[in-house]
C-alpha cells in the first residue's frame, strides 16, 4: 500500500519540491490549489498527469485555507496518512497590508486542518506537519535561536503563525495527535517567489548583467538571515513526520549573512565586483570591476540604491538558528552552503533572463517586474 500525502500550498516553492520528493519516495500525493484567474501551477507543471489516466499518483484539488467545509470534505475523501500544511500568505511585508486575511489563512487555516482531522476521527491515522517559521523569534531574545528560545513576533504574519504554532502543540497535547511544528529558517531556491529578497536580488543581478535593468532598489541592507536551500528543507519536513515521537524542530544552517553580502555574492557569481558607498538610506553600490567578457557593464555604474518603501514597520534584524536537535536526533545535515545556493539561483536566473532578452529583442511580451 502506497502512503497518501496531502500538501496544502502545493503550488508554492516548498510545495513543488516536496511533491517531487514524496513522489520519488512512492507516495500518492494530493495537492490543494486555489482557483485563480490565470494558471498558478508553473512550479508543478512538470509533475502534471492526465486526469483521464487511471492510477495517478499526483492529484490536485481546488480548495482554500479559509474554507472549512472544503477542507473537511477533501480530507475525508483523501484519508491522508500525512498532511503537510504549507499554505500561507507567506510575505512578511505584505502581511502589514492584509493582516486580517493573513490571520485567517495562516492562523485559523491551521486550526481548520487540525480540527478536520479530529472531527473525521483520523487522529490516530493522520500525521500533520505545520510550516512554522523563524519569524516567530522576531525581536532578538537569544542567539542562536533554538526550540526553547522565547517568541516575540514582529509582523501580522508572524503573529498569525504563532497562533498556528500553539494550536498545533495544543491539539497534540489535548487529543494525542501526531502534529509537529518545523520551525524553518529562510530557505530559497531558483523557484523562490520573485518578491522575496534573495530572488529579487538574483533576478535583478542577472538583468543588470545582461543590460535589461539599470538598478536594483532594496530596503534594509543590514538585516541578517540564516539562508538555506529549499531542497534540504523539504527533506527535513518528511523526516519530521517519520520520527517516533511528535515534536517541534528548528531547521537552519547555523550561519547568518546580511542582505548586503547576499547582493555582493550574487554579483560576484557573474564576475562583477561591487563597491558599497555611504550609509543608511544614502547607501549605494557601484561596479568596481567586471571580469566576465559576456557582460558589457560600465565601471562606476550605480547598480544598487536604498528605497525606504521596502522598510517594514517593525523589522526582524537577526536570525540565526541552531538545528542541533535535528542534526543529532534525526541525522539531518544540509547539503547546500550559501555559495552553492547563490550559484544555483544565479545560473537559473541568468538563463531565464537570456530567454527574456531574446523575446524582448524579437518584440515579444517579457516577464513581469512588479516587486
Ligand atoms: P510560497 O509563498 O511560495 O507558497 C505559499 C503557498 O500557499 C502557495 O501554494 C499559495 O497558493 C498557497 N496559499 C496561500 N494562501 C492560500 C489560501 N488561502 N488557501 C490555499 N492556499 C493558499 O511559500 P513557501 O513555499 O516559501 O513556504 C511554504 C510555507 O512555509 C508557508 O507556510 C510559509 O509561511 C512557511 N515558511 C517558509 C519559509 C521560507 O523561507 N520559504 C520559512 C519558514 C516558513 P498560490 O500559488 O495560489 O499563491
Ligand atoms: P522574510 O524574507 O521576511 O525573512 O520572510 P524576505 O526575503 O522578504 O526578507 C528578508 C530580509 O530582507 C530585507 N529586505 C527586503 N525584503 C524584501 N522582500 N524586499 C526588499 O526589497 C528588501 N530589502 C531588504 C527584509 O526587510 C528582511 O529583513 C521569509 C518568508 O519566506 C516567510 O514566509 C518565512 O516565514 C521567513 O522567510 C522565514
Image (cartoon, rainbow, N blue to C red):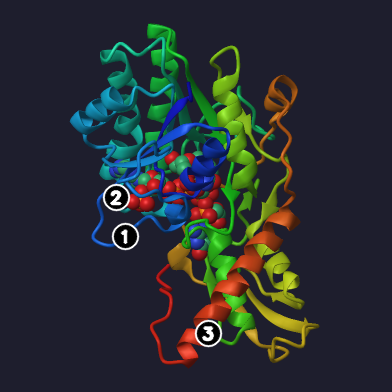
Q: Is residue 226 above or below residue 276?
A: above
Mark closer to the chain start, 1 or 2: 1
On the image, the x and y values in percent for residue 271 come to 77, 77
Residue 98 badge: 2
Q: Quadrant of residue 238?
A: top right
Marks 1, 2: nearer the viewer? 1
Q: Quadrant of residue 273?
A: bottom right
| Residue at numbered disc 3 | 357
| Residue at numbered disc 1 | 39
On the image, the x and y values in percent for residue 318 come to 62, 45
Under circle 2, the secondary element is loop
Marks 3, 2: nearer the viewer? 3
Viewer-closest of 241 and 321: 241
- State how far apart marks 1 and 2 are (Cα): 23 Å
Which residue is at a point 26% across and 55% down the rendered structure image? 36
- State how far apart marks 3 and 2 are (Cα): 35 Å
Q: Badges 3 and 1: C-beta atoms under 8 Å apart? A: no
On the image, the x and y values in percent for residue 326 come to 68, 26
Viewer-closest of 46 and 279: 46
Under circle 3, the secondary element is helix
Q: Is residue 23 above or below residue 247?
A: below
10 Å crowding of disc 1: few (<14), some (14-19), many (20+): few
Mark closer to the chain start, 3 or 1: 1
Amino acid at each position: 500500500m502506497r502512503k497518501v500525502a496531502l500538501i496544502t500550498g502545493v503550488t508554492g516553492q516548498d510545495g513543488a519540491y516536496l511533491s517531487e520528493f514524496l513522489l520519488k519516495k512512492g507516495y500518492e500525493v494530493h495537492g490543494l490549489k486555489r482557483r485563480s484567474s490565470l494558471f498558478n501551477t508553473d512550479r508543478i507543471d512538470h509533475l502534471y498527469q492526465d486526469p483521464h489516466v487511471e492510477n495517478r499518483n499526483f492529484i490536485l484539488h481546488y480548495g482554500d485555507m479559509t474554507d472549512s467545509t472544503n477542507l473537511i470534505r477533501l480530507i475525508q475523501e483523501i484519508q491522508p496518512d500525512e498532511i503537510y500544511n504549507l499554505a500561507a500568505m507567506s510575505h512578511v511585508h505584505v502581511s502589514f497590508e492584509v493582516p486580517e486575511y493573513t490571520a485567517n489563512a495562516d492562523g485559523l487555516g491551521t486550526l481548520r486542518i487540525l480540527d478536520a482531522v479530529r472531527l473525521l476521527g483520523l487522529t490516530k491515522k493522520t500525521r500533520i506537519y505545520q510550516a512554522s517559521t523563524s519569524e516567530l523569534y522576531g525581536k532578538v531574545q537569544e542567539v542562536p535561536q533554538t526550540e526553547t528560545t522565547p517568541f516575540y513576533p514582529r509582523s501580522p504574519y508572524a503573529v498569525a503563525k504563532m497562533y498556528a504554532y500553539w494550536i498545533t502543540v495544543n491539539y497534540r497535547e489535548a487529543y494525542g495527535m501526531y502534529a509537529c511544528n518545523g520551525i524553518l529558517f529562510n530557505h530559497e531556491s531558483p523557484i523562490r517567489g520573485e518578491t522575496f529578497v534573495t530572488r529579487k536580488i538574483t533576478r535583478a543581478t542577472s538583468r543588470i548583467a545582461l543590460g535589461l535593468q539599470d538598478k536594483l532598489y532594496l530596503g534594509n541592507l543590514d538585516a541578517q538571515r540564516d539562508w538555506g536551500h529549499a531542497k534540504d528543507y523539504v527533506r527535513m519536513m518528511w523526516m519530521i513526520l517519520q520520527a517516533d515521537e511528535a515534536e517541534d524542530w528548528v531547521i537552519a544552517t547555523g550561519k547568518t549573512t546580511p542582505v548586503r553580502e547576499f547582493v555582493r555574492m550574487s554579483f560576484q557569481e557573474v564576475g562583477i565586483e561591487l563597491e558599497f558607498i555611504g550609509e543608511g538610506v544614502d547607501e549605494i553600490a557601484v561596479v568596481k570591476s567586471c571580469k566576465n567578457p559576456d557582460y558589457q557593464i560600465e565601471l562606476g555604474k550605480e547598480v544598487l540604491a536604498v528605497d525606504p518603501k521596502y522598510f517594514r514597520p517593525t523589522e526582524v534584524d537577526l536570525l540565526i538558528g541552531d538545528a542541533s536537535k535535528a542534526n543529532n536526533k534525526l541525522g539531518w545535515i544540509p547539503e547546500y552552503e550559501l555559495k552553492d545556493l547563490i550559484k544555483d539561483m544565479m545560473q537559473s536566473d541568468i538563463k531565464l533572463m537570456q530567454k527574456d532578452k531574446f523575446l524582448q529583442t524579437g518584440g515579444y511580451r517579457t516577464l513581469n517586474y512588479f516587486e
